[in-house]
Image: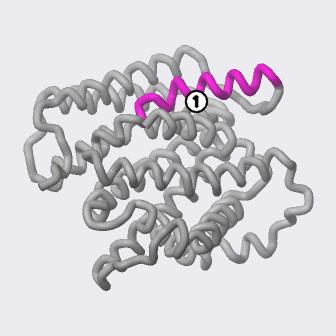
């Protein structure tokens, strides 16, 4: 979990550097294709060949589609917002997992769960700041809404993947969901890649793309799915809680030494929103009987 949090902080910062050099669809297609090729090369050596049933293949394909469109929504939103915002919204993953589980079980939410959800969404409102006028604020809000869409896809993926991972190796599921997801995105991403002028893309953007392929798409996905195999989805999702402070600290450190230069949003509204959101998520995790998808 600690390793995943550290890699997540790097992803939010370096992905912003990548999106400054690539258009969203181009970045998503290159990232998905790069990860798919790498995973195909590792299949049969580091990874075993898949042994999914025909029904399970359909679910693997659905997971792949959710993954790649989660990635597109993420980079589309990050193009308009700042790295600290996605980190904060992804910290709501445990809350989303709990709500989805309650819907599946058709169980009535407790008063503490309702209060936690209310606090978390109040925090999101402070970050979105719908009362703030101006072009820059409107652009950031637009980006934040794309990120929220990515988080919703990630929540559904986390719950669905947990079921398949009871029967299959996390590396195999990671590999083939990403491969099928990359194929599913070809109709949307192939033409923008062919039309893009990649000769003038800055080095920092290429570095960000390499990080997204090797660390985020391959390394972090294997870590996430490996944790889902041995822990409950909500227990795994808890590690997202540490992403906002880790991302803020990393972005500030890299900015101070001149390695990256990007806008920050560290005013009072962000800090209030962060404490409200994380407080709400923490309160939700204290709800008795909130374990998700219990094994056995």
Residue that appears at 51% across and 71% down: 181
Q: Nearer the viewer, residue 26 or 170?
A: 170
- In the rendered structure, the answer to whether residue 244 lies left or right of residue 215 reads left
Quarter of the view holding residue 112: top left
Residue 36: x percent and y percent? 59, 70
Where is mark 1, residue-wise? Answer: 247
How many residues crowd around disc 1 within 10 Å: few (fewer than 14), some, or many (20 or more)?
many
Residue that appears at 58% across and 50% down: 216
| 270 vs 44: above or below | above
| Quadrant in which the N terminus is drawn | top left
Q: Magenta includes 163?
A: no
Residue that appears at 83% across and 26% down: 258
Res 129 visible: no
Residue that appears at 57% across and 59% down: 72
Residue 73: x percent and y percent? 54, 55
Most extreme residue toward the top is 268
- In the rendered structure, the answer to whether residue 293 lies left or right of residue 131 reads left
Res 6 visible: yes
Residue 273: x percent and y percent? 45, 23
Region rendered in magenta? 240-257
- In the rendered structure, the answer to whether residue 257 lies left or right of residue 288 reads right
Most extreme residue toward the right is 200
* Prevalent SS, magenta region: helix
Q: Secondary structure at mark 1?
A: helix
Q: Nearer the viewer, residue 160 or 135?
A: 160
Q: Nearer the viewer, residue 256 or 130?
A: 256
Most extreme residue toward the front is 45
Quarter of the view holding residue 167: bottom left
| Quadrant in which the C terminus is drawn | bottom left
Residue 77: x percent and y percent? 59, 48
Q: Magenta includes 245?
A: yes
């Amino acid at each position: 979990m600690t390793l995943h949090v550290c890699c997540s902080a790097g992803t939010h910062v370096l992905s912003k550097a990548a999106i400054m050099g690539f258009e969203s669809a181009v970045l998503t297609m290159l990232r998905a294709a790069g990860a798919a090729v790498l995973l195909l090369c590792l299949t049969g050596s580091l990874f075993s060949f898949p042994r999914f049933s025909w029904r399970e293949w359909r679910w693997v394909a659905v997971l792949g589609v959710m993954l790649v469109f989660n990635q597109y929504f993420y980079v589309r939103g990050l193009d308009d917002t700042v790295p600290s915002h996605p980190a904060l919204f992804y910290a709501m993953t445990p809350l989303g997992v709990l709500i989805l589980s309650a819907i599946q079980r058709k169980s009535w939410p407790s008063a503490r769960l309702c209060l936690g959800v209310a606090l978390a969404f109040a925090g999101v409102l402070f970050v979105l700041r719908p009362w703030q006028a101006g072009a820059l604020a409107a652009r950031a809000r637009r980006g934040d809404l794309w990120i929220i869409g990515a988080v919703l896809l990630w929540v559904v993926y986390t719950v669905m993947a947990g079921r398949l991972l009871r029967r299959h190796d996390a590396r195999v599921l990671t590999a083939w969901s990403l491969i099928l997801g990359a194929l599913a995105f070809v109709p949307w991403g192939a033409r923008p890649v062919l039309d893009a002028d990649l000769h003038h893309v800055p080095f920092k953007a290429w570095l960000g793309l390499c990080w997204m392929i090797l660390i985020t798409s391959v390394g972090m996905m294997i870590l996430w799915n490996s944790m889902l195999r041995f822990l409950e989805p909500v227990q795994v999702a808890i590690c997202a809680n540490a992403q906002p402070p880790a991302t803020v600290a990393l972005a500030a450190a890299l900015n101070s030494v001149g390695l990256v230069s990007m806008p920050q949003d560290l005013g009072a509204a962000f800090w209030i929103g962060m404490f409200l959101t994380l407080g709400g998520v923490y309160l939700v995790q204290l709800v008795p009987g909130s374990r998700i998808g219990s094994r056995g």
